[in-house]
Amino acid sequence: MTREEFEELVAEALDRIPPELTRLMDNVAVFVEDEPPADDPELLGLYEGTPLTDRGEWYAGVLPDRITIYRNPTLRMCEDRESVVAETEVTVVHEIAHHFGIDDERLHALGYG
C-alpha cells in the first residue's frame, strides 16, 4: 500500500469520528510517518501533547498536540487491505482517545488496545 493510500485511510478514519467529538478536539494535528522511533519498532500510533482533561488556565500559546500514525508497522502486521483499514481505524481512535484523556488501560478494556 502506498503512502498516499495509507494517508487516505487515516483521513477516512478521522472522518468517521462523530462530529460531536471532533468539535471538542482542540489544538491537535495528525501526521502519518513511515516508521516509529527505533526504540519501539512495533508502535502503530503515538499521541504527544497535553490531554484536554489536563489543560487548565495556563494552557495558551502552545504548539499543537501531535498524533502520529505509523504506516509500515501497520502494514507488516496486517495480512490484507481489510485488516489495514480496520487496524488503522482502531489506531486513530486510540490516539484521539488519548487527546481526550483516556488511558491505555481503559482503551484496552473497550477493545481499542
Image (cartoon, helix red, strand yellow):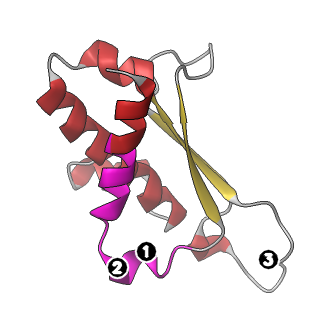
Give the amino acid type for the residue marked by disc 2 in the picture.
Pro
Position of residue 71 in the picture relative to residue 111 (left or right): right
Q: Which residues are magenta?
A: 9-25
The percent position of residue 83, horizontal first and vertical second, equals 16, 29
The residue indicated by pointer 3 is 59
Residue depth check, mark 1 versus mark 3: number of the one nearer the observer: 1
Q: Which residue is pictured at 84% across the width and 80% down the height?
A: 58
Q: Is residue 25 above or below residue 49?
A: below
Are the two marked residues, 1 and 2, in contact with CB atoms closer than 8 angstroms?
Answer: yes
Are the two marked residues, 3 and 2, in contact with CB atoms closer than 8 angstroms?
Answer: no
Q: Is residue 16 magenta?
A: yes
Classify mark 2: helix, strand or loop.
helix
Secondary structure that dominates the magenta span: helix
Q: Is residue 15 above or below residue 55?
A: above
Give the amino acid type for the residue marked by disc 3 in the picture.
Tyr
Residue 42 visible in this rendered orientation of the protein: yes
Quarter of the image for the C terminus: give it. top left
In primary-sequence order, the first of circles 1 and 3 is 1
The percent position of residue 10, horizontal first and vertical second, equals 38, 45
Residue 91 visible in this rendered orientation of the protein: no
3D distance between C-alphas at marks 3 and 2: 24 Å
Q: Which residue is pictured at 22% across the width and 20% down the height?
A: 78
Q: Which mark is residue 22?
A: 1
Q: Is residue 53 magenta?
A: no
In the image, 12 versus 18, the foreground residue is 12
Q: Which residue is pictured at 60% across the width and 65% down the height?
A: 51
3D distance between C-alphas at marks 1 and 3: 19 Å
